[in-house]
């Protein structure tokens, strides 16, 4: 008599072609997940999928815009049709954005909020309704927030507001879903060396009339460990939160920041 083996878990990762999202896709793939990733650009998704498959990982992907409910509905349908019910959702897609608040345009404000916050809500709702995670006592929802979601960031009001809201959404949903066994947590990176971090340094350098190197030195001086975190270090926490050993961790906002924040 043979015993049926459970299929590998399925992870859906947004913003999975660079930075933290790419590191998360790789981490979960190495942990045995079947990973379905998305980003806005189809060519970038295709290349990333090919690269990760070349590493021996079980990965598929599709282009999607987290600001658009119809796009996310199509994404979830495709992911489920490809791999089956979703076990792990990682809401990672995001963007920076800010400047002197008096000069922030409506367009910038709404795009930051739509990308960083509303997209998290829209995709989470879609996965709960149509992704197959409901009823899975080992389901995991992990939202990539920021230490900027716990404290104000100078010249970053839209970004900080969006990430504070993601933390609040995470804590509320974690309590809501706790009776089902599905956990919901936020991972809050500090300064992480990614393409986004370089764009942020460029923005501050322009605002303060200095160089990106000087901005980086100033940032690193605030970090007790004295350095930026790596995407892989953030991904490591995401990976741990998907395990059964992390089943009692929910409705939390956990820092990966080199000691930048102890809150």
Image: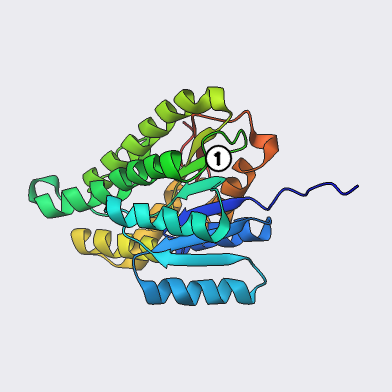
Residue 101: percent from left, percent from top: 13, 46
Residue at x 14% of width, y 49% of height: 100
Residue at x 49% of width, y 27% of height: 177
User: In the displayed structure, would residue 93 be above or below residue 214?
Assistant: above
Q: Which color scheme is applied?
A: rainbow
**Extreme front residue here?**
1
Residue 176: percent from left, percent from top: 45, 24
Picture mark count: 1
The one of 215 and 136 positioned closer to us in this rendering: 136
Q: Describe residue 58's horizontal placement relative to residue 213 as left or right.
A: right
Can you identify the residue that label 1 sits on? Answer: 140
Q: Describe residue 149's horizontal placement relative to residue 141 as left or right.
A: left
User: In the displayed structure, would residue 218 be above or below residue 101?
Assistant: below
Residue at x 36% of width, y 65% of height: 198
User: In the displayed structure, would residue 139 be above or below residue 236?
Assistant: above
Q: Describe residue 153's horizontal placement relative to residue 7 as left or right.
A: left
Residue 191: percent from left, percent from top: 43, 52
Q: Tell me the crowding category of disc 1: few under 14, some 14 to 19, or many 20 or more residues within 10 angstroms, Cα based.
A: many
- Residue 144 in sight: no
Residue at x 61% of width, y 58% of height: 34
- Residue 9 in sight: yes
**Extreme right residue here?**
1
The one of 251 and 227 positioned closer to us in this rendering: 251
Residue 40: percent from left, percent from top: 34, 65
Q: Secondary structure at mark 1?
A: strand
Q: Describe residue 104's horizontal placement relative to residue 156 as left or right.
A: left
């Amino acid at each position: 008599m043979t015993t049926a083996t459970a299929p590998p878990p399925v992870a859906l990762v947004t913003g999975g072609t660079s930075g933290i999202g790419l590191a998360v896709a790789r981490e979960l793939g190495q942990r045995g997940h079947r990973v379905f990733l998305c980003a806005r650009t189809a060519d970038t998704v295709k290349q990333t999928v090919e690269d990760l498959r070349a590493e021996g990982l079980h990965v598929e992907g599709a282009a999607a815009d987290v600001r658009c409910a119809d796009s996310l509905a199509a994404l979830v349908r495709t992911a489920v049709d490809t791999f089956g019910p979703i076990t792990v959702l990682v809401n990672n897609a995001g963007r920076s954005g800010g400047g002197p608040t008096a000069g922030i345009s409506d367009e910038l404000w709404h795009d930051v909020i739509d990308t960083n916050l509303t997209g998290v809500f829209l995709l989470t709702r879609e996965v709960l309704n149509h992704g197959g995670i409901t009823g899975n006592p080992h389901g995991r929802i992990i939202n990539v927030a920021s230490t900027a979601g716990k404290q104000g960031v100078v010249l970053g009001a839209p970004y900080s507001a969006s990430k504070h809201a993601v933390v609040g959404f995470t804590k509320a949903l974690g309590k809501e879903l706790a009776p089902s066994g599905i956990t919901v947590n936020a991972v809050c990176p500090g300064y992480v060396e990614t393409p986004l971090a370089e764009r942020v340094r460029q923005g501050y350098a322009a605002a303060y009339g200095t160089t990106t190197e000087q901005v980086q030195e100033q940032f690193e001086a605030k970090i007790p460990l004295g350095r930026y975190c790596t995407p892989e270090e953030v991904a490591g926490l995401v990976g741990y939160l998907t395990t059964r050993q992390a089943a009692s961790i929910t409705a939390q906002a956990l820092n990966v920041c080199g000691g930048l924040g102890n809150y």
